[in-house]
Image: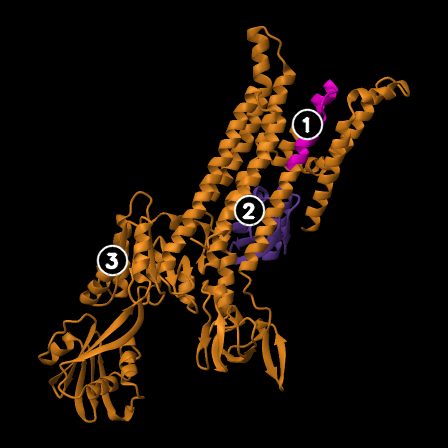
Amino acid sequence: MNKKQKDMLRRILISAALLVCLQLISAQQFSTIDSLLFPGAGRWLRLALYLVNYYIIGWGTLKKAFKGIMNRQVFDENFLMAVATLGALALAIYENGDYAEAIAVMLFYQLGEWFENYAVGKSRRNISQLMDIRPDYANIEQEGHLIRVDPEEVEPGSVIVVQPGEKVPIDGVVAEGSSALDTAALTGESLPREVAAGDEIISGCINLSGVLKVRTSKAFGESTVSKILELVENAGERKSRQEDFISKFARVYTPAVCYSALALALLPPLVRLLFMGLAPMWGVWLYRALTFLVISCPCALVISIPLSFFAGIGGASRAGILVKGSNFLEALSKTDCVVFDKTGTLTQGVFEVEGIHHSTMEEEKLLEYAALAESASSHPISRSLLKAHGREPDRSRVEDIREISGAGVLATVDGRQVAAGNDKLMKTLGVEYRDCHSVGTIIHMAVEGKYAGHILISDMIKAHAKAAVAALKELGVRKTVMLTGDSEAVAEHVASKLGIDSFYSRLLPGDKVEKLERLLAEEKGGGKLAFVGDGINDAPVLARADIGIAMGALGSDAAIEAADVVLMDDDPLKIAKAIKISRKCLGIVYENIVFAIGIKLICLILGALGIANMWLAIFADVGVMVLAVLNAMRCLLVYKL
Amino acid sequence: MKKTYKIDVDCANCADKMERAAAGTPGVKSARVNYMALKMTVEFQEGQEESAVMEQVLKNCKKVESDCEIFL
């Protein structure tokens, strides 16, 4: 509780106690002092005591209402409460009746405000604690001593020391030591990750076991942890349609109810007086109008909707899903078409040599030739060849490497002409080749113009990919599509294995945008299209989709920037989880909208008919607010989804 | 030019009012208030003196919600 809240709570308690005491003494008992002083003295004393109590609880509101009028901001909740309670007080003075009502209304109103304030402050702290990954310092070794410095002051390329239990403050590469890292705050993954010298290390992880020396690769402001914090903190700025609706609604609703209250106070008595020849009953209708004012405060709505989104985004980030704004949370809940990039998203993007077929020489020898010919390239395929070869290639044995884009390479290895590439390359060289029955990337080899066999390389499908597609179907996603630059055979193999509806193969990065646009044009009825990629080469596609989801984003700045939703690890099951979280959150938002507006309308009708009095009105108002806030907090509970 | 300021305000409705007051201040291109994070992001028009504009923004916000604060 901060100072303001403590102060308010004290006032509420004092006022409530005083109210109870005053209620114990009846108006008759007060009038017994009349004989001691002067006639009417008891009545005046009673009024004075109640006014003191009203002052204690309501002064702040009166002051704000007055300031509002001076600044031409008439219709705010302070004004409503001031008019309603002052009106009720005036009626009570006139009748020497029940002052308690006016004070109780103010009391409950303040209690509601206090609760709202407290709940919001509490959830604000809760959520920022969840995202408490900001490192406070970095350790630098100087003359044998460790000194703590501000991470902002550490230049890229310096060596920092991370001790067990400390957060890694800046992205870098491990220079010395090995340890296990807790990445839960970033990815929601509870299994520690092992790192050793030479491994990349990401800021925001917690070092669990050993001392690490890390050579920083970025400045603090460019590090993963800063990017993530920036993203989460700015998430509230992109507002959803619901939030905009509510603030518009509140702007219209309050004045509308005020004018209706005025009409309710004036019209029925006048009609009774002029047309029906009955007593006007001004008091009764004024009371009903005041009840109207009490109901007209839109607090429950105005607070619970942004709170729900805030909690939803907070809960999602705890699960390793960063959502860049409540508008994206809203869009995510309407996803009915999911487009995947293949490599790195559904497959691991790690290629492995699966077999060597029809080799005319020793298989080892063929692999060596292939690895040497491709040794200049950094393509994943060449890397997989080198890995299978198992030894550092002796580059002096290779000469005249010529890369033929989209076909393969030509090189001279140990003085022999070697060609390694796809069927296109074989055709242009006029070499007869044998097709492979297995699915994957096939590298045909020709040595001295003669076919020497082929090497089959394939990408591994991720463990959860199939379950992820099934989970999306279960959520009612109408269509799943896969885009890939790979060959049709590979695409078909992966798509059928995972149960993906359709696929487009042999796409260049530009073609992917075009295909996506065609798919976007097919969307109808408010359904949204999500594109899932790993952020490498597909930033334009991520940006073009209704919702761009980047996965495995740890350490990839481009992905964090281009995407709307960022999955911190590379588990495709998280896509379904993100949709589930968004649906739960939106469900709660709609519950709150319907619930709050519904109760208000019912109370307005009951108030106009004279069934609901001011007590009921304030109970309904505060009660709805409390329930709506508690309901909104449910958005945080997304762990089991 | 965009800048983010820490703010203090008590209710969501008041935060909305601040947002509108800030957005309506001369020299401000757009303004967003994030009530939950207690932050205001202001985008200034070209060639405007930030501190002078922000002083006016604060004045306008105080006008609509006397109980608010922007930490400049």
Whether label 3 touches label 1, CB < 8 Å: no
First-in-chain label (3 vs 1): 1
Q: Is residue A97 magenta?
A: yes
Label 3, residues with CA under 10 Å away: few <14, some 14-19, many ≥20: some
Q: Compared with residue A334, is residue A341 higher up or lower down, i.e. above or below?
A: below
The amino acid beneath tag 1 is Glu
Label 1, residues with CA under 10 Å away: few <14, some 14-19, many ≥20: some
Q: CA distance from mark 1 to mark 2?
A: 35 Å
The residues colored magenta run: A88-109
User: In screen coordinates, is A385 left or right of B21?
Assistant: left
Q: Compared with residue A161, is residue A550 higher up or lower down, i.e. above or below?
A: above
Q: Tell me, what hue is chain A?
A: orange
Q: CA distance from mark 3 to mark 2?
A: 48 Å
How far across and down, in percent of the image, does residue A325 sit? 46, 53
Q: Are marks 1 and 2 on the same chain?
A: no
How far across and down, in percent of the image, does residue A299 sit? 57, 38
